[in-house]
Image: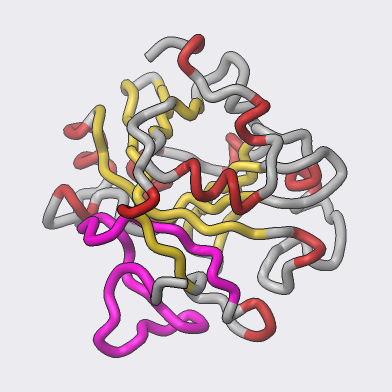
Amino acid sequence: MGASLRLDRAFFARDVLEVARDLVGRVVRHTTPEGAVAVRLSEVEAYAGEADPGSHAFRGPTPRTRVMFGPAGHAYVYFSYGMHWCVNLVCGAEGTASAVLLRAGEVVEGLELARSRRPAARRDVDLARGPARLTQALAVTGVLDGIDVCGPGPLEVLPGNPVADGEVVWGPRVGVAGAGAPTPWRVSVVNDRTVSDYRVGGRRSPGSRGPGPRT
């Protein structure tokens, strides 16, 4: 899994929905002094910046969101609800703000290390099942905000195993309320046990698990 296998900047410098669709099945790998952990993505969400009320960048650039305005192929890492980190991959043309939130996946390398970072997980499918769990398993924190995933560095995105169209589903984003709530910009693998619970406006929808409705 050398640097030559990384997805290049051209992969990310496209429309956010195209990148989100193509990220499912790809592998995110973070190497630390402890070792490497890699996660094959099963669920992501697209955010379209100033055109998207659900995006942090909806009202324009701020010190927090400046990395979202490009160039593509960098990580946008933020602290959520004062509790945990979330990691996004910046995409699109430089000067616009779009990014894909990495929501969930399967640990495919460094399983024991991921288990040590997520001792509360009862099953391996729960190790990276949700954006906070994913960053914990990978040991991603704000130190990586702005890092270039296309160049040399500890965080990389590898080709993995792309998923066929018939094996993915699009649905509403998790925990997004208000004007951005109905946007069906979450893409996930059908019947994959690592896909996170669906919540409407931050609350779990009764009887709902996994992907939202097909669009």
Res 137 → quadrant: top left
Q: Residue at x 59, y 47 (%)?
A: 18
Task: Decide which of 12, 54 is in the foreground and name it.
Answer: 12
Residue 53 horizontal/vertical position (percent): 73, 73
In the rendered image, the vertical position of residue 61 relative to residue 25, given as above or below: below
Task: Decide which of 110, 195 is in the foreground and name it.
Answer: 195
Q: Is residue 103 magenta?
A: no
Magenta segment, principal secondary structure? loop
Task: Please state the total of marks drawn on the protein image.
Answer: 0
Q: Is residue 61 left or right of residue 79?
A: right
Q: Residue at x 71, y 51 (%)?
A: 98
Q: Residue at x 29, y 81 (%)?
A: 208
Task: Decide which of 3, 115 is in the foreground and name it.
Answer: 3
In the rendered image, the vertical position of residue 26 relative to residue 64, given as above or below: above
Task: Decide which of 154, 26 is in the foreground and name it.
Answer: 26
Q: Is residue 191 magenta?
A: yes
In the rendered image, the vertical position of residue 32 relative to residue 172, given as above or below: above
Residue 159 horizontal/vertical position (percent): 42, 26
Q: Residue at x 32, y 47 (%)?
A: 105
Q: Which residues are magenta?
A: 183-212
